[in-house]
Each structure stands twice: as structure tokens, then as C-alpha cells.
Amino acid sequence: MIRYDRLSALIARFEMRVSDAEPGTGNLRILGDAASGHPARIALRLRGPVTDDRPDERALVEATASWGGESNPLFAALPATVSLPLTDDDTAALVRFLLAEARAARCGSGVVLSRLAEVLVVRLLRAEIERGATGPGLVAGLSDPRLSRAIVVLHEDPGRAWSNAELAEIAGMSLSRFADAFRTRIGETPMAYLRRWRMTLAHQDVDRGHRVQEVARRYGYGSSEALARAFQRQHGVNPLAVRRGGEAAAAT
């Protein structure tokens, strides 16, 4: 059976960063009972510090977490604040390990804490996908067992000339039902989502100094001019304008 991993392609494309934060400034917090200090939940706020602290809680660990910002379609589709109660034994054990590492403050603890916090963020995202979403967006699509298969292959192979019929077959749905379900859950058609995903990746690649012609081939565009037109429509600028290090004159 083919395994459709709903997060790996996104993790590969968007660098996750977790670093220490001053008290009251972190957007990732491990919160615990105010009296006992027993860890109770993890909270992540996408923009700005966590603000939903409860009177009976206090922050045990605070960090700043980022994962591609608005360009990451999953982060952009999440609620303003995501919270995960520590009812799962594995997550609770991970939190206890992280707290012990933070208290010990041994050599290399900064790196260890960052990696452990990244794992906690992934667990938060898993839980949110499994919970689903009340409105259309990527979280709602990934939470659907069938639609998520089609979304995963778009994420993993964006340069392929996908058709709605191929995607419907992967999802195990009729073409009409797939198209209707995708639009309802995601909020746009499969081809519109694919175009937007391609342009998100193209912006990353051009920003990193890749040649426009190379990027065009990578994402299924027949020429650098075709890519530039699509790029301009989505990002409002020509791809040459976002080249790093003043390398625009060397493109194509």
C-alpha cells in the first residue's frame, strides 16, 4: 500500500526554526499548573506571543517558532492559536524530557531543546490535521483521508502535468465528486491550488538564486516567459526582481 505522508513534503520545503524567547514574547509555550508546575499543554500562536494563558497556568518553557510564515500554506491555514493538551503519553514524555534538559542547562542544551521543540511543533500539527477544520483550507483538505492523497502528490511532485482525472483516481473518487469535494474543503480547484503551490516553490527557488529557466522546467512551464507571467500574477513582481545578491542580470 502506498503511504501518503501529509507533512514530510511541507517540512522539506519550509525550514522550521525554534529558538529561545524572553518571558512573555514566545509564540510557543509549554504551560503547566501554576501551583505544582506539572505540564498541562502546548500552545503555539502563529503571529505574536501566546496570549491565551489561563489564571491557573504558568509558562514552563517559552520559545519562538517559525515555519515559512504566510508562504507555508499549512501554517497560513491554521487557527491563530493551536493548543495541544498533554493527554498523549508519548508527547507528555517528550515534554518531560525537554523540561529536564532545560533545567540541567548542560553543554549543547540549546541545540537539543531546539530539536525537541521542533518535534513538539510537528505533533501539534498532526493533532490539528486529525482534528480537522471548520472552514475551507489546507488543514481541512489534509484531514480528509481521500483528498489528502491527492494533495500529498501535488506537494511531492509539483512539476508533473497533473490532471483532475489522475488526482481523482489517486483519491479513489469519481471525477465530479473529487472536484466538488476539493473545492469545498480547500476553497479552490485542484489546478488553482497546484498553480499557487508551484509559484510558492518557484519564489523560494528564484530567491535562492536558481536560474528562471531552470525553475520553469522544474515546475512544468514551457518557458521562462510563461513562468514569469504566472509569477507576476501571484506575487506581483517579475521573478528577476527577487533574485538574491543582485544576480538578476545573469538569469536566463
Image: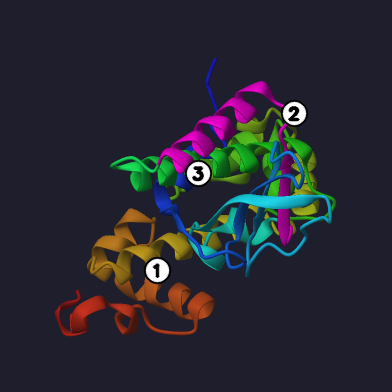
Q: Find the magenta span and give its range.
A: 79-104
Q: Earlier in the sequence, mark 1 or mark 3?
A: 3
Q: Nearer the viewer, mark 1 or mark 3?
A: 3
Identify the element where label 2 is drawn.
loop
Q: State the residue position of label 3.
A: 117
**Three-letter amino acid code at the position of disc 1:** His
- Residue that numbered label 2 is attached to: 87
Would residue 141 appear left or right of 75 to someone viewing this image?
right
Distance CA(mark 2)–CA(mark 1): 40 Å
Quarter of the figure with the C terminus: bottom left
Question: In the rendered image of this protein, does residue 114 appear above or below residue 4?
Answer: below
Residue 61 rendering spot, x and y as whole percentages: 57, 50
Report which quarter residue 62 is drawn in.
bottom right
Q: Position of residue 10 (x, y in %)?
A: 49, 47
Query: For the point 83% across and 50% down, which residue is it?
Result: 56
Between residue 90 and residue 100, name the one nearer to us.
Answer: 100
Say if residue 53 shows up in the picture. yes
Q: Say which residue label 1 marks.
A: 203
| Coordinates of residue 133 in the picture (x, y in percent) | 79, 48
Under mark 3, the amino acid is Ala
